[in-house]
Image (cartoon, rainbow, N blue to C red):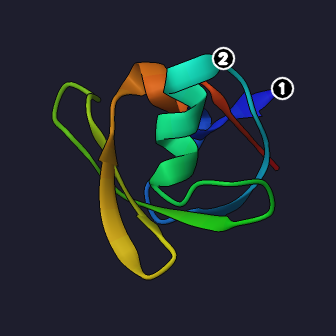
Amino acid sequence: MRTLRDAQVGQTVRVVRLHGEGAVKRRIMDMGITRGVEVTVRKLAPLGDPIEVTVRDYELSLRKADAEMIEIE
């Protein structure tokens, strides 16, 4: 299983599934990350946390812990 945390800078991936439960999963979905959406990894912070991505034509920063809950292909 590959997660968004495994994606490289400049890579565009498609979300397959969201893991997690309750409020955490709902927060990720409220940010526009849902099954089937394309996500482009734009930048990584020097220590790898957070990850800056582009989703649905806007930029978003995600913590590594949240990125691990997003399964990609």
Q: Residue at x 44, y 19 (%)?
A: 65
Q: State the residue position of label 2.
A: 21
Q: Residue at x 80, y 63 (%)?
A: 36
Give the class, few, some or many, for how many residues have Cα within 10 Å of label 1's Cα (few <14, many ≥20): few
Q: Quadrant of residue 46?
A: top left
Q: Position of residue 4 (x, y in %)?
A: 59, 40
| Residue 13 circle label | none
Residue at far bottom of view: 57
Q: Is residue 42 shown left or right of residue 67?
A: left
Q: Quadrant of the N terminus?
A: top right
Kindly identify the amino acid type of the residue bearing the numbered disc 1: Met
Q: Secondary structure at mark 2?
A: loop
* As drawn, 54 above or below 73: below
Q: State the residue position of label 1.
A: 1
Q: Is residue 7 shown left or right of residue 27?
A: right
Q: Quadrant of residue 44?
A: top left
Q: Position of residue 18 (x, y in %)?
A: 72, 35
Q: Which one is nearer the viewer's eye here, 22 or 11?
A: 22
Kindly identify the amino acid type of the residue bearing the numbered disc 2: Glu
Q: Position of residue 63 (x, y in %)?
A: 34, 29
Q: Residue at x 29, y 29 (%)?
A: 48
Q: Is residue 48 shown left or right of residue 15?
A: left
* As drawn, 67 above or below 33: above
